[in-house]
Image (cartoon, rainbow, N blue to C red):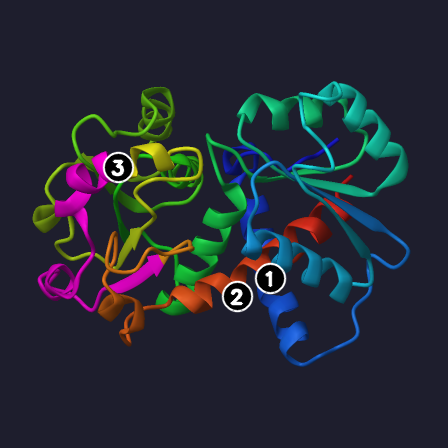
Amino acid sequence: MKHFLHISDYSDSELWEILNLAKDLKEKFHKKQDYSPFNNRSLAMIFAKPSARTRVSFETGFEWMGGHALFLGPNDIGIGKREAIKDISRLFSRYNDIMMARLFDHAHILELAEYSTIPVINGLTDYNHPCQIMTDIFTVWEHLGAIDNPKIVYMGDGNNIVHSWLHLAMRLPINFVCCCPEGYRPDQDTLDKAIDAGISKINISHNPAEAIANADIVYTDVWASMGQKDEAIEREKIFSNFQVNESLIENSGKNTLFMHCLPAERDREVTDGVMEADYSIVFDQAENRMHIQNAIMVYLSENN
């Protein structure tokens, strides 16, 4: 059974198939064409972590494609608490056609997939966020016209977003810089694997002014993710020099575009001015979540 758990589980040609499919589905959506590959099918959406964008994009996309999406929040299903994960996986496999889960513990998504007889899509874990980074590289492709070693500079915590960029770097050629404070580097094993793959140029920096030089894209995320809010005050002090502001982008020496996976805490990790600037492609990026996820679901239905 083919699932969508990590970007590096796929070959470069498979990733391009998904990207091209997303382009086609986006065009169909904008033209309001009838497209119903999931007629009489259902998508179970398991949320241990709430998210407006993930729910709305999956639900809207799946229903546009003719299916029915079911939302299961933290109070509906205590994943790994009230019931064994393998039991939930086997049961939902009998009821549904696709499962999407947005969870804390990465081991939980792996166990869901292990016991499932339907495709499982990783909607986010504390380790990675593959749907988001497929969205991001699709958006980069749209705006730059190619994926040929674009310089992508991530400012902030070496978190699940960074881990998925590193998984992408194992398959498609990018020049990726993670600019983070000391002590907030990404997972070393993931970093080593991305470097050893030899596909992309990868660097860790602790100097925002140096890191952003000649950047095609500067990207950031909240400094304290869900489950880290008790660290927010401490993190704000540590990360203050890593804010993406107008001055930083003006000194890149290039027409740099700005990206953020949302939700944004304006005037914290990014200024309101950058969010609203002409070079901000944040809402193109946010829209594309739905088109990429649609493509992933269609791809899985055609390849299982």
Quote the CA–CA distance across marks 3 and 2: 28 Å
| Residue that label 2 marks | 287
In the picture, the quarter occupied by the N terminus is top right
Quadrant of the rendered image containing residue 275? bottom left
Badge 2 amino acid: Glu
Residue 148 placed where, x, y %? 34, 54
Instruction: For marks 3 and 2, give the one nearer the viewer.
Output: 2
Frontmost residue, 209 versus 274: 274
Reply above or below: 116 against 266: above
Frontmost residue, 281 versus 37: 281
Residue 297 located left or right of residue 181:
right
From which residue to which does the magenta span run?
233-259
Q: Earlier in the sequence, mark 3 or mark 2?
A: 3
| Residue that label 3 marks | 202
Frontmost residue, 218 versus 231: 231
* Residue at the extreme bottom: 31
Residue 135 placed where, x, y %? 49, 55
How busy is the neighbourhood of tag 1: few (under 14 within 10 Å), some, or many (20 plus)? many
